[in-house]
Amino acid sequence: MLDSWKEIAGYLRRTVRTVQRWERSERLPVHRQPHARVDSVFAYADELDAWRERSCAAVRPSVEVGKLCRIAVLGFEWSGSPDDRILGESLADDVARRLACYAGLEVIARPSVKRLTEQRRSLRQIGAAIKCDCSFTEGLFTALMAQPCRAN
């Protein structure tokens, strides 16, 4: 049993804020134990695994077995206002979560990528740090991908 937001987030390899959002918007199976002042939360690993499998089932394509590509979602940027930064991070979290459903893709954890981008490193430096060697930029979205795919 996972008995805190931090443990649940660690199990899913996401931030506490992300798993709290998933509870509200995507029915993440989290249970609450009422107390006088503040409820405590807990979750069962098998329920989280089943939830993740259900949420990934609709988007999982077939990929050649034995191939693995790494990708890091760096985020979305707009005007720089606090609200835009929150929206950009939320979108990047969602993109990373959906990409993780694809067999053959290894998605670098968002907190790891965020730490590197907050250090104001260049795309080339971030790519070297996470062992991805090319970058892809589309409008306001940036991702780093290893190329070509390597065998497992």
Image (spheres, helix red, strand yellow):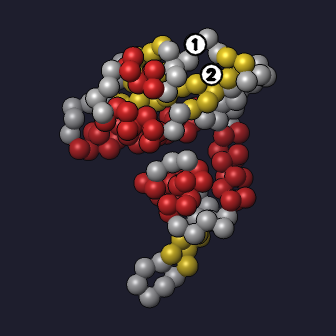
Q: Is residue 71 visible?
A: yes
Mark 1, Cα crowd under 10 Å, few <14 / some 14-19 / many 20+, is few
Q: Amino acid at mark 2?
A: Cys
The image shows residue 147 at horizontal and vertical percentages of: 57, 13
Where, quadrant-wise, is the N terminus in this rendering? bottom right
Residue that mark 1 sits on: 147
- Ranked by sequence position, the earlier of labels 2 and 1 is 2
Q: Residue furthest top?
A: 148
Q: Residue furthest bottom?
A: 36
The image shows residue 117 at horizontal and vertical percentages of: 34, 32
The image shows residue 30 at horizontal and vertical percentages of: 58, 65
Against 103, residue 123 (above or below) is above
Q: What residue is drawn where x is 37% and y is 33%?
A: 116
Q: Nearer the viewer, residue 82 or 14?
A: 14
Q: Are the two marked residues, 2 and 1, in contact with CB atoms closer than 8 angstroms?
A: yes
Against 40, residue 78 (above or below) is above
Which of the 4 image quadrants contains residue 59?
Answer: top right
Q: What residue is drawn where x is 50% and y is 15%?
A: 133
Determine whether, in the image, residue 129 is placed left or right of residue 64. Answer: left
The image shows residue 149 at horizontal and vertical percentages of: 65, 15
Q: What residue is drawn where x is 45% and y is 38%?
A: 112
Disc on res. 44: none
Q: Amino acid at mark 1?
A: Gln
Q: Is residue 25 visible?
A: no
The local secondary structure at tag 2 comes to strand
Q: What residue is drawn where x is 67% and y is 64%?
A: 44
Residue that mark 2 sits on: 69
What is the C-alpha distance between the residues marked 2 and 1? 7 Å
